Image (spheres, coloured by chain):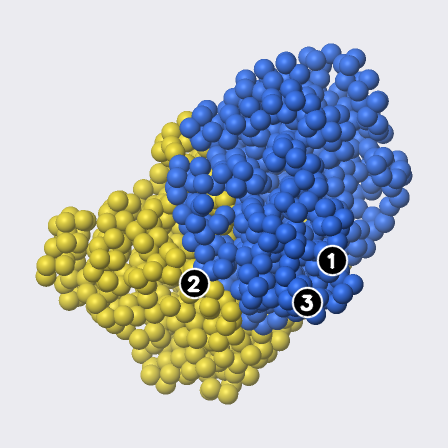
């Protein structure tokens, strides 16, 4: 195909793939988004190549679908919504460009995964911020750019944290380095005068990074990003605080986050926690049986000038809080899993297979934002919705992640089902698609609207829709970047 | 220029005759602000055609629509601290004074955000929040500095940025009357009438709300803002002594806090210590000391300034003031030990004069609340200016500071500029996780030709994108703290900074096709 030849001229022979098996891999994922086969897959290795592809797409009016993480994918945002799309697979862009142990910043290309970054950071005495047990093949930069919640709400100052600066190729094919990274000098020359590309505030009177955050690749493609890191803990205490009702744990979370005591802080139900720990269905069932209904996970981590002192005072203060909270139980271990096992689990990507697939082989998530105090109402509603669609509510994992220093939370329901069972699959699909309408009617904010949620979210955000289209027209006037996603 | 009778009548119908004026005396009061002489070489800037005082979002919307109908430019005005608040790109422009929109609409204590209208000041909100054990960060522009002005529209830095963040990063929602008259409520406010997130659905429109600086009214009027709040360690109420313009004094550092002054042998040691104090997450308010001592009155300051050994003044300017807040005695002890360890590591000392309880009480008042530091900068000479000014790593700040001192000292020596003790305003953001802020502040006399000429020369040096400051970042924090038709910062620096000017003008054009939001402190759709 002549157009593929043009792509080969940009990325090199062998980096444009159009074999039927390859195209099949990129045409669907584990979400309910309908499959569509791309025209081909281009695998650039440099920013110039990405820029070349985007310019070519504008000339030929070809839709592009950027993909950074390795499989499996779960959200439908990497499936072409338009026929004739070209996948830009950024997985060859794997350089960890710079680790800055003084300013606690790392610069990575988009193909760098959590599985690859964490060991390198450890050598420098640093640790990455992660979502809850991400799959090892997940792109670090894209996870953060998509506003995946991290597990340490006290360090989550802003919705875009820990994302800092990036090099962006907009839909026009123009390149811009955001925040502190812009300027007349190369990045290497910037390092010589002490810059670390860590100041994220937008250039002038707009903020470039925010325009590509949560954009599902519809505004620009990043070719590197800087993200915040933190020092590795030299001594960690992990607490599992349990309760048969969720409200006392929500209260305790509020108190902890308000005074920024500790690091990791989230709440899960028994099934979710068992799924995180267990290696297979049997073990997950066993663990679940041993667990109380709700668990608050809290870590106290030792780093900084006085690592030991930090953990000691925080533990003492935390124990005082627990006493005041009253009837809460501190689980010392969960069956054979010790505190250390759980600490390790929280600091590394998921083992294979990905933990959400272990219980029933298939899963689908529903997640949205709200405030912690509204969580019980949504949990109740979810169970009612599940019941009405004959989806077993006991197969729903619940994860409540406070974000932006406790001002809101990410509320996630994992619907575990057997993907080979069409009835279970249909019921899960009904819940994920139609059930989301009911949750939105209750006030669920689908801030990151994947798949069918986009329609739900934008039907409640008319003015946002209008304004986002105007912005899209500036940065991607030919709508070549992931058309059909969000409101485009 | 006067409005046409029809245009005036249309605006009067919206707000009522008592809330609009084109009286010359009234109009003149809205174009006089410090800084005019330096920038415009006059005491005045462009006189607005009328002043309109809307009382609601609906009235703002109606005014903006009338402006589109009659092709009148408009500019919102709230706390009005700097030249950006009154400058106009055209005489055919009205000012919307938002002082009637002054309500604290909601304080969500649990979820730590407050919803406010434009005329709510940071200081007023701080006083109200303390009753709930909550806090919003200081803005050093004085007690009248507005929450919306600093969060959404302009800029605002303060010593508590280390603990309570700053700039647009604390915006959890806003209501925005666009230049075409539509009303946008960002994020969760539009989707579900709750004000906890401004991001989404999809990409974040905070990206066009503001960047390093705000649009200063150039792209519409912000009528509500949901601001992120923080825990307050102190008491719900306290007594401050003295009336403005006297410093408000505390008898002691408030309960829940301790304050320290650490002095370092070198500037680099001080900066490294500042980074580590930030990273240790122990500071509630952190600040490099500006120019030595602090005095109640101008005469007292001048006397001290004359007597003081310049070397000693320089040494004191290498001091870090740190206010620590804590929720328990254990936490306080830990944080104090951390501070002492960091100070020790960087060879610092706790000098008696900076650790006197009364001195620390005096400093704490300024470092805890938005009382402001501007009196120190206005009084000695009349006015002050800031350049260079940036947000960066401590490492880059060292480089920039060296260049700044080399460049500015000739002007100090010839008496054009006063800079007691080399006085950058230097503070870390968010436990240093996004770097630090620095403003190179100096004082000058706007009615002294030598002084004025010196400042203009120094400004020209630092505003030259091809000069030695070109690599340190766009001046005036991206250009939002200057008058674009005069200084042309965005226009001149954009091409060297990844062409950000191109995107900004396109955003302006998309939002404001009739170019009616006054662009004097923003950008026009096309540079004239």
- In the picture provided, is A464 more to the left or to the right than A327? left
Q: Where does residue B162 sit, x and y in percent of width and height?
A: 63, 40
Q: Which residue is mark 3?
A: B9
B172 and A17: which is toward the camera: B172
Identify the residue under disc 2.
Answer: A470
Looking at the rendering, which quadrant does residue B183 occupy? Answer: bottom right
- Classify mark 1: residues with Cα within 10 Å, few (<14), some (14-19) or many (20+): some
Query: Which colour is chain B painted?
Result: blue
Q: Are marks 2 and 1 on the same chain?
A: no
Q: Residue at x 48, y 50 (%)?
A: B524
Q: Position of residue A364 (x, y in %)?
A: 41, 72
Image quadrant occupied by the C terminus of chain A: bottom left
Find chain A in the image and tell me its colour. yellow
Alpha carbon separation for disc pair 2 and 1: 36 Å
Report the mark closest to the observer, 3 or 2: 3
Q: Could you tell me which residue is drawn at 45 percent across and 56 percent down?
A: B509
Q: Residue at x 38, y 32 (%)?
A: A185
Looking at the image, which is closer to me, A197 or A175? Answer: A175
Q: Position of residue A338 (x, y in %)?
A: 53, 54
Residue at the location (49% across, 60% down)? B514
For numbered disc 3, what is the local secondary structure? Answer: helix
Residue A142 visible in the current orientation: yes
Q: Is residue B484 left or right of residue A283?
A: right
Label 3 marks which chain's residue?
B
Callout 2: helix, strand or loop?
Answer: helix
Pointer 1 or 3: first along the chain = 3
- List x then y, in percent, for residue B18: 78, 63
Measured Cα–Cα span from mark 1 to mark 3: 11 Å
Q: Residues within 10 Å of mark 2 (few under 14, many from 20)?
A: some
Q: CA distance from mark 3 to mark 2?
A: 33 Å
Question: Which of the 4 image quarters holds residue B322?
Answer: top right
Numbered mark located on residue B21 in the image: 1
């Amino acid at each position: 195909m002549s157009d593929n030849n043009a792509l080969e001229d940009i990325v090199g022979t062998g980096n444009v793939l159009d074999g039927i098996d390859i195209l099949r891999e990129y045409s669907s994922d584990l979400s309910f988004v309908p499959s569509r086969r791309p025209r081909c897959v281009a695998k650039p290795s440099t920013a110039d190549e990405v820029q070349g592809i985007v310019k070519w797409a504008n000339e030929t009016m070809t839709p592009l679908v950027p993909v950074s993480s390795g499989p499996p994918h779960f959200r439908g945002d990497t499936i072409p919504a338009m026929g004739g799309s070209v996948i830009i697979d950024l997985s060859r862009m794997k350089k960890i460009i710079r680790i800055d142990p003084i300013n606690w910043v790392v610069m990575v290309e988009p193909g760098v995964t959590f599985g690859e970054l964490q060991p390198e950071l450890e050598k420098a005495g640093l640790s990455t911020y992660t979502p809850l047990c991400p799959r090892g093949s997940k792109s670090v930069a894209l996870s953060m750019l998509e506003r995946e919640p991290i597990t340490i709400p006290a360090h989550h100052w802003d919705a875009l944290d820990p994302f800092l600066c990036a090099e962006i190729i907009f839909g026009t094919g123009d390149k811009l380095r955001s925040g502190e990274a812009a300027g007349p000098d190369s990045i290497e020359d910037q390092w010589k005068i002490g810059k670390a590309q860590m100041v994220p505030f937008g250039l002038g009177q707009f903020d470039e990074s925010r325009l590509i955050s949560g954009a599902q690749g519809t505004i620009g493609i990043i070719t590197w990003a800087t993200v915040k890191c933190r020092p590795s803990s030299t001594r960690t205490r992990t607490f599992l605080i349990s309760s048969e009702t969720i409200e006392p744990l929500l209260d305790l979370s509020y108190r902890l986050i308000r005074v920024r005591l500790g690091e990791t802080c989230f709440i899960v139900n028994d099934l979710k926690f068992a799924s995180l720990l267990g290696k297979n269905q049997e073990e997950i069932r066993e663990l679940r049986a041993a667990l109380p209904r709700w668990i608050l996970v809290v870590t106290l981590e030792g780093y900084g000038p006085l690592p030991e002192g930090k953990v000691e005072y925080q533990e003492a203060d935390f124990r005082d809080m627990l006493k005041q909270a009253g009837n809460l139980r501190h689980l010392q271990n969960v069956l054979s899993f010790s505190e250390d096992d759980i600490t390790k689990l929280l600091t590394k990507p998921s083992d294979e297979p990905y933990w959400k697939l272990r219980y029933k082989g298939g899963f689908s998530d529903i997640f949205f934002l709200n405030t912690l105090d509204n969580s019980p109402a949504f949990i109740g509603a979810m169970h009612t919705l599940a019941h009405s669609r004959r989806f077993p509510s006991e197969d729903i994992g619940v994860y409540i992640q406070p974000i932006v220093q406790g001002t809101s939370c990410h509320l996630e329901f994992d619907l575990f089902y057997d993907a080979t069972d069409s009835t279970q699959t249909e019921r899960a699909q009904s819940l994920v698609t139609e059930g989301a309408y009911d949750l939105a009617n209750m006030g669920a904010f689908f801030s990151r609207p994947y798949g069918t949620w986009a329609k739900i979210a934008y039907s409640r955000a008319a003015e946002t829709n209008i304004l986002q289209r105007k912005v899209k027209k500036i940065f991607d006037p030919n709508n070549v970047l992931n058309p059909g996603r969000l409101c485009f | 220029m006067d409005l046409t009778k029809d245009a005036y009548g249309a605006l009067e119908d919206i707000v009522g005759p008592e809330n609009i004026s084109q009286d010359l005396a009234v109009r003149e009061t809205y174009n006089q602000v410090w800084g005019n002489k330096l920038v415009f070489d006059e005491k005045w800037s462009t006189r607005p055609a009328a002043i309109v005082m809307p009382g609601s979002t609906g009235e703002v919307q109606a005014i903006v629509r009338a402006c589109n109908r009659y092709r009148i430019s408009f500019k919102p005005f709230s706390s009005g601290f700097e030249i950006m608040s009154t400058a106009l790109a055209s005489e055919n422009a009205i000012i919307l004074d938002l002082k009637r929109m002054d309500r604290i609409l909601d304080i969500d204590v649990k979820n730590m955000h407050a919803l406010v209208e434009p005329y709510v000041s940071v200081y007023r909100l701080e006083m109200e929040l303390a009753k709930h054990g909550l806090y919003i960060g200081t803005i050093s522009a004085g007690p009248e500095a507005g929450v919306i002005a600093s969060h959404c529209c302009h800029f605002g830095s303060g010593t508590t940025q280390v603990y309570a963040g700053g700039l647009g990063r604390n915006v959890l929602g806003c209501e925005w009357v666009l230049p075409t008259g539509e009303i946008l409520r960002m994020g969760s406010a539009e989707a579900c009438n709750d004000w906890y997130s401004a991001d989404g659905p999809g990409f974040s429109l905070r990206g066009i709300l503001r960047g390093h600086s705000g649009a200063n009214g150039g792209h519409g009027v912000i009528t509500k803002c949901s601001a992120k709040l923080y825990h307050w360690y102190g008491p719900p109420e306290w007594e401050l002594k003295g009336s403005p313009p006297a410093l408000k004094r505390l008898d002691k550092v408030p309960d829940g806090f301790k304050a320290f002054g650490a002095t370092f042998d070198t500037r680099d040691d001080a900066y490294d210590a500042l980074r580590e104090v930030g990273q240790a997450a122990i500071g509630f308010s952190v600040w490099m000391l500006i120019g030595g001592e602090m005095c109640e009155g101008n005469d007292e300051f001048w006397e001290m300034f004359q007597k003081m050994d310049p070397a000693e003044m320089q040494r004191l300017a290498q001091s870090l003031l740190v206010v620590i807040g804590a929720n328990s005695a254990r936490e306080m002890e830990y944080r104090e030990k951390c501070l002492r360890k960091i100070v020790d590591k960087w060879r610092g000392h706790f000098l008696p004069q900076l650790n006197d309880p009364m001195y620390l009480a005096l400093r704490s008042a300024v470092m805890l609340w938005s009382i402001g530091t501007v009196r120190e900068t206005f009084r000695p000479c009349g006015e002050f200016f800031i350049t260079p000014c940036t947000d960066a790593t401590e490492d880059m700040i060292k480089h920039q500071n060296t260049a700044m001192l080399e460049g500015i000292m000739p002007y100090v020596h010839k008496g054009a500029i006063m800079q007691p003790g080399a006085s950058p305003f230097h503070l870390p953001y968010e436990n240093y996780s996004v770097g630090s802020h620095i403003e190179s502040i100096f004082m000058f006399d706007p009615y002294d030709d030598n002084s004025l000429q010196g400042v203009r020369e120094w400004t020209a040096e630092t505003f030259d994108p091809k000069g030695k400051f070109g690599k340190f970042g766009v001046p005036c924090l991206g250009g939002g703290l200057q008058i674009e038709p005069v200084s042309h910062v965005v226009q001149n620096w954009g091409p060297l900074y990844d062409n950000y000017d191109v995107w900004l003008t396109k955003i302006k054009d998309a939002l404001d096709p009739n170019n009616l939001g006054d662009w004097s402190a923003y950008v026009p759709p096309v540079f004239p």
